[in-house]
């Protein structure tokens, strides 16, 4: 076992009088618990309220013109459609029915984005397939409107009187953006 000699730095530091150690620490530390007062310092910034975040609406209620009639004869008119995702528009393209008949794309797509219809437990393309043509046309138009987020309207002005107004632009077939 090795003993430390008196010349060891550890022993030398311990041999210093307590007052000298405190003087060294005080000289190295900043003066006081707060930084020195400065007269040229800028005033503290006033905290700003956080910016309001825009809430994105993802579901939209609708009412079918005629309504879907289920197997028991119950008419379902009120429903909800959610915004479409890229996946919603891509998945139906793999469907054999869509590959054989491209017009079937809107049926499959609507079956994916309609989240509620009346009191039905679920909505799928089989239900959309049995809707009246006027309800299908309504849902196709509704789909275009909510997914375009206002881009189906254009501000124009009358060429005769220069009065401004908006017109609804015709879109492409559903699912083909």
Image (spheres, rainbow, N blue to C red):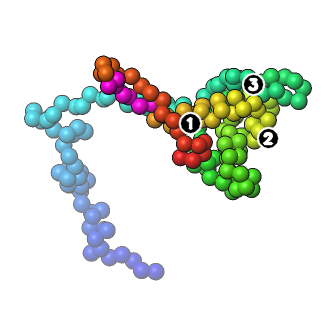
Q: Position of residue 39 (x, y in %)?
A: 10, 33
Does 75 sit above or below residue 26? above
Q: Give the farthest residue toward the front.
A: 160
* Residue found 78% across the figure and 28% down from its top: 68
Indicate the secondary structure of the residue bearing disc 1. Answer: helix
Whether residue 46 is visible here, answered yes or no, is yes
Hey, which quadrant is residue 36 in on the image?
top left
Does 113 sit above or below residue 86? above
Indicate the secondary structure of the residue bearing disc 2. Answer: helix
Kindly report the distance in space between the C-alpha atoms of the residues bearing marks 3 and 2. Answer: 15 Å
Q: Is residue 150 left or right of residue 6?
A: right
Count residues near mark 1 (Cα–Cα under 10 Å), then give few for <14, some for 14-19, many for 20+. many
Nearer the observer, 156 or 30 = 156
Q: Which residue is labeled 2 in the image?
A: 126
Membership of 156 in magenta stretch: yes
Q: Which residue is labeled 1 in the image?
A: 144
Nearer the observer, 31 or 21 = 31
Q: Give the farthest residue toward the left.
A: 40
* Residue found 77% across the figure and 39% down from its top: 129
Residue bounds of the magenta highlight: 153-159
Nearer the observer, 54 or 39 = 54
* Residue found 69% across the figure and 24% down from its top: 64
Question: Residue 67 bears which disc, if any?
Answer: 3
Q: Give the farthest residue toward the right.
A: 72
Nearer the observer, 80 or 135 = 135
Hey, which quadrant is residue 115 in on the image?
top right
Whether residue 118 is visible here, answered yes or no, is no
């Amino acid at each position: 076992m090795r003993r430390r000699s008196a010349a060891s730095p550890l022993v030398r530091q311990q041999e210093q009088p307590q007052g000298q150690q405190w003087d060294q620490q005080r000289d190295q530390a900043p003066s006081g618990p707060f930084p020195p007062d400065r007269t040229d310092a800028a005033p503290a910034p006033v905290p700003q309220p956080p910016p309001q975040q825009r809430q994105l609406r993802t579901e939209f209620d609708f009412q079918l013109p005629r309504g879907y009639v289920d197997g028991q004869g119950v008419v379902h008119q009120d429903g909800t459609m959610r915004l479409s995702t890229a996946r919603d528009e891509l998945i139906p393209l793999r469907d054999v029915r869509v590959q054989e008949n491209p017009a079937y794309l809107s049926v499959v797509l609507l079956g994916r984005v309609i989240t509620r219809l009346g009191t039905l437990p679920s909505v799928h393309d089989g239900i959309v397939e049995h809707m009246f043509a006027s309800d299908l046309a309504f849902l196709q138009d509704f789909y275009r409107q909510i997914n375009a987020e206002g881009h189906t309207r254009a501000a124009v002005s009358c060429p005769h009187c220069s009065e401004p107004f908006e017109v609804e632009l015709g879109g492409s077939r559903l699912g083909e953006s």
